[in-house]
Image: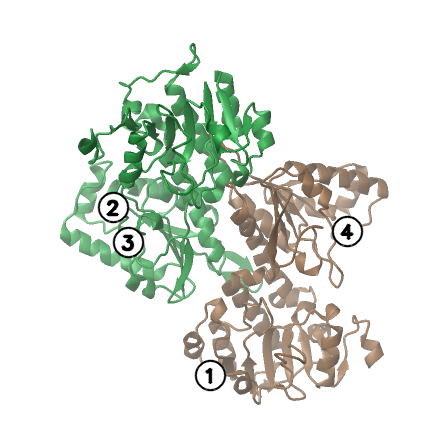
Chain colours: A brown, B green
Amino acid sequence: MKIAIPKERRPNETRVAASPETVKKLVALGCDVFVEKGAGAAASFTDTAYKDAGATIGKDATTTYKDAKAVLKVLKPIAGGKGDELKAMPKGTVVVSIADPYRSEKELDAYAKAGLTVFAMDFVPRITRAQSMDVLSSQSNLAGYKSVLDGAAVFNRAFPMMMTAAGTVAPAKVFVMGAGVAGLQAIATARRLGAVVSATDVRPASKEQVESLGAKFVAVEDDEFKQAETAGGYAKEMSDAYKAKQAALIAETIAKVDMVITTALIPGRPAPVLVTAEMVKSMKPGSVIVDLAVETGGNCELSVAGKVVEKDGVSIVGYHNVPGRLATDASSLYAKNVVNFFELMFDKEAKDLKIDWDDEIIKGTCVTHEGSIVHPALAHAEKKT
Amino acid sequence: MKIAIPKERRPNETRVAASPETVKKLVALGCDVFVEKGAGAAASFTDTAYKDAGATIGKDATTTYKDAKAVLKVLKPIAGGKGDELKAMPKGTVVVSIADPYRSEKELDAYAKAGLTVFAMDFVPRITRAQSMDVLSSQSNLAGYKSVLDGAAVFNRAFPMMMTAAGTVAPAKVFVMGAGVAGLQAIATARRLGAVVSATDVRPASKEQVESLGAKFVAVEDDEFKQAETAGGYAKEMSDAYKAKQAALIAETIAKVDMVITTALIPGRPAPVLVTAEMVKSMKPGSVIVDLAVETGGNCELSVAGKVVEKDGVSIVGYHNVPGRLATDASSLYAKNVVNFFELMFDKEAKDLKIDWDDEIIKGTCVTHEGSIVHPALAHAEKKT
């Protein structure tokens, strides 16, 4: 069977859904792999490298897509208008991508209408068996690393303490908000570079992880906190009195640090505002904010998607597609996630697709199939089916 | 006596010759310190901060310079033409700056003609007593740090090895050429970030320093090398046979690494070419070269001053004024160097200048005085005096 790896056509997308390494693996499984000319260029994967791995280079999108049973992509296909990617895919084509289903009502309708079977890699359930397919983790990890480098790039000072003959340069103080995968990697990276790091998270249980990386956990540690801390994993709603005390502590912390990195995302909803305009004003001139949530509204009130803006002497970094700023590694890991997922639906004997519709991972990721939106978490699914 | 700290007017200069901290020190010595409006803006030092430290803010260059006995600057004054800085300074004014005397014949003539007493901070002798005034060290150290971050900013991969559920990301391989102050700090920074680092230098004695930072020293370690290694400090001329073997090893190394950082400068002469176009071609797509010598001709044949260029899939970073890319720290340290130097020529009792012309540091740094070019190392000095 033929697999198509097209060039990504959405703006700011530098990644590609296959690396020479994963092409080799797909070819070894017995697939015909077509990679569109130049698909890996921004990720430094040359056509020659893909060819050497066993792929055929498709000279354009039409050649690449033609007769493909499965399409592996990074971002969901463009539906209609300029750059439409649907008309190249016949009914029944399996499409694997980061589909961002909660914010893609219109696109999902179009995919259903086109008869595509679309899987959303960003819906892979967080279960042990699916860890190797978890694109949110693989991409957030890189985003967390890059956020620190992006902050350091506009920061007018060095991170580490430096003892020089002319005097000592104080270490930078970095505050990371949100201690998920991205936040933890940001902490680790800022620590590597020699900064003094603190961090916070709404989950008191994350204190231990933050401290294990050598950072200070910022929280009002009263009895309520201590109870919540041992209650485990997910956030428990704290009292209003606690929230007020914690908010004051966070504001105080932000005014003292040199760099704030925000990483708070809520799936399917706009990002929470953590840093207000007033807080930005309280920071020292030359301070830096890196907002990893800028594409879903931003954790900082003043961040602008795709830009570095300056406000009250503070630089606010809001790049698009931060994992894509490490296009080679981000593509390599995404490609591995995708191949691991693909193997789930591939019959090695028959060398063809064989989808087990009862598999928890398949059920959890399939968003459109046989003309309908099928995923139970999508509110608009019912209306259409 | 009055000291003037003007705003720097040369292109790409973001630094300033005083920080609020050094202003405080100069004021405590009994000086009247005038800082030009906005002089510290690019270094995140506000006029308010200078004022709070005891400075008067000069509303323009004329006000700032008027009646000043000493001018503290970062770069040598512009002589003639647009932005001329000489006419504001009366005969006898003491001017302290990075004067780049070997490449400033025309300017030195103008300074002499204007009757200025000009001191070149970049000529401070490398003796123990002058270490706290050594601007080459303080600025190179920061340049070495920033070179790694500038390389990491355009590199499409992460530096550290990352073990993830989707697979392992290999660490970046960084090769540092030249193990002076900048090179050693580049090694340390790349190591901090998790890269596998190697380095080379024409001084076999630097092997020990490189290895003490956890990097591999790249050299053909034959008997000739071993003899030179123990011969101490400065470079001994190696045999042609050795040089050929070493060149082959360097070429081989460059072809294998992901990033090359070059730091080789020769005072008063163009930078040596270390990385040829052919070597660039031998590198993997996505590799990065950072050329810290780009402003004096470049260590890489293909680097372009002030630009990031791409050639054969390799990004070549050639920023101007790399220490100035960390304007706050670079200014702070430079300002401390300058104050330490200034104290040498200041009489605390009389609260006025009192220059000891027999002092080794004064003699080593004074380039023009009483109408003449006076420094013995300047070939053109004799012609004029």
Label 3 amino acid?
Leu
Res B48 visible: yes
Residues at marks 4 and 1, CA–CA distance in whole angstroms: 49 Å
The image quadrant that residue A106 belongs to is bottom right
Query: Which residue is identified by label 4?
Result: A235
Give the foreground label among 3 and 4: 3
**Residue in front for this viewpoint, A264 or B172:** A264
The image quadrant that residue B289 belongs to is bottom left
Mark 1–mark 3 CB contact (< 8 Å): no
Disc number for residue B202: 2
Label 2 amino acid?
Val
Give the foreground label among 4 and 1: 1
**Residue in front for this viewpoint, A11 or B382:** B382
Disc 2 and disc 3 on one polypeptide chain: yes
Dot 4 alpha-carbon crowd within 10 angstroms: few under 14, some 14 to 19, many 20 or more: some
Disc 3 and disc 4 on one polypeptide chain: no
Query: Which residue is identified by label 3?
Result: B274
Residue A360 position (above or below residue B348): below
Q: Quadrant of the C terminus of chain A?
A: bottom right
Label 4 amino acid?
Ala
Residues at marks 1 and 3, CA–CA distance in whole angstroms: 39 Å
Which residue is pictured at 42% across the width and 51% down the height?
B319
- Is B271 on the left-hand or right-hand side of B165? left
Which residue is pictured at 55% across the width and 52% down the height?
A150
Dot 2 alpha-carbon crowd within 10 angstroms: few under 14, some 14 to 19, many 20 or more: some
Mark 2–mark 4 CB contact (< 8 Å): no
Give the foreground label among 2 and 4: 2
Q: Position of residue A22 (x, y in %)?
A: 51, 73
Disc number for residue B280: none
Q: Earlier in the sequence, mark 2 or mark 3?
A: 2
